[in-house]
Image (cartoon, rainbow, N blue to C red):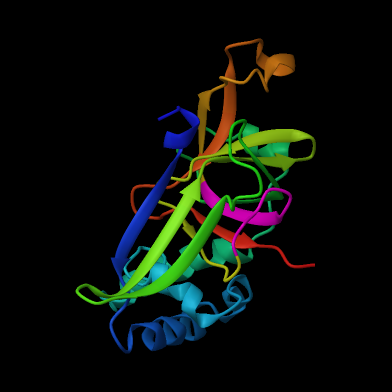
Amino acid sequence: MSDDAREGFHAESAYPAPGALTRARSRLFELAPEALAAFDNWTSLACLCDTGWLALGRPSSAMARIVRRRLRVLTSRPLSFSAFTAQRAGDGPVHLKGKCAALPGHGGGAPIWRTEVRDDASAGRLLIEDGHDFLLSIDGGDVYVLSNGGHLVSATPLHAGDDVSVFGFADEVPDRWGLAVAAHGRGGLLPAIRSGSELPLLLTSVVR
């Protein structure tokens, strides 16, 4: 398996139990109705039900304040490339918006990210997600998107050339492709965005 083939993930999990999506929808209406625009359909909430973005199982007032603050990130203005590169590793979550590009070696027109709901005879209904690391082009600069642990919360697959919003934490990765030569010299570092310990990376397609 090539290095590029390993720059991604495949995840299968049980689809949320009956009523979970309704509770997730109610939580959004209650805490951050302005964040609803980030989701193009309610099934997109399925991958967030058990994450810190919604925290459905802990309805205390203190947790509600935390979740409200986190969800506000989904309505924040995206950072410019220069503002993002000024962040320190671990800062976030922040919002970036740009055009996605496949890494060298990523096959043809295959989706960079996709989700699927599948019924399995033994396991029941499954939520399946396949994602690959990719580059996000912002203001002429490239940010490396680390896919591991992330979620696409849009119904349609993500392809190279699509506009996308990404919500995650600042980081850096080795520049194995020489993309940051002008700024750092070959073998330097690329700015990156990734999942956090409690909040997974989120991606939403931008529909014009």
Does residue 131 lie above or below 86 as drawn? below
Does residue 55 lie above or below 5 as drawn? below
State which quadrant residue 117 falls in.
bottom left
Locate residue 143, reporting x and y percent.
Answer: 63, 36
Q: Nearer the viewer, residue 102 or 148?
A: 102
Locate residue 50, reporting x and y percent.
Answer: 31, 68
Q: How many marks?
A: 0
State which quadrant residue 154 falls in.
bottom right
Q: Residue at x 52, y 32 (%)?
A: 88
Q: Is residue 163 left or right of residue 67?
A: right
Locate residue 59, reporting x and y percent.
Answer: 29, 79
Does residue 13 lie above or below 60 as drawn? above
Q: Residue at x 68, y 23 (%)?
A: 179
State which quadrant residue 105 falls in.
top right
**From the image, which quarter does the C terminus lie in?**
bottom right
Q: Is residue 32 left or right of residue 56?
A: right
**From the image, which quarter does the N terminus lie in?**
top left
Q: Residue at x 64, y 56 (%)?
A: 165
Q: Is residue 127 magenta?
A: no
Q: Nearer the viewer, residue 149 or 28?
A: 149
Locate residue 30, reporting x and y percent.
Answer: 47, 85
Q: Nearer the viewer, residue 20 or 198?
A: 20
Magenta residues, as a range? 157-168
Q: Residue at x 51, y 45 (%)?
A: 132
Does residue 204 lie above or below 144 as drawn? below
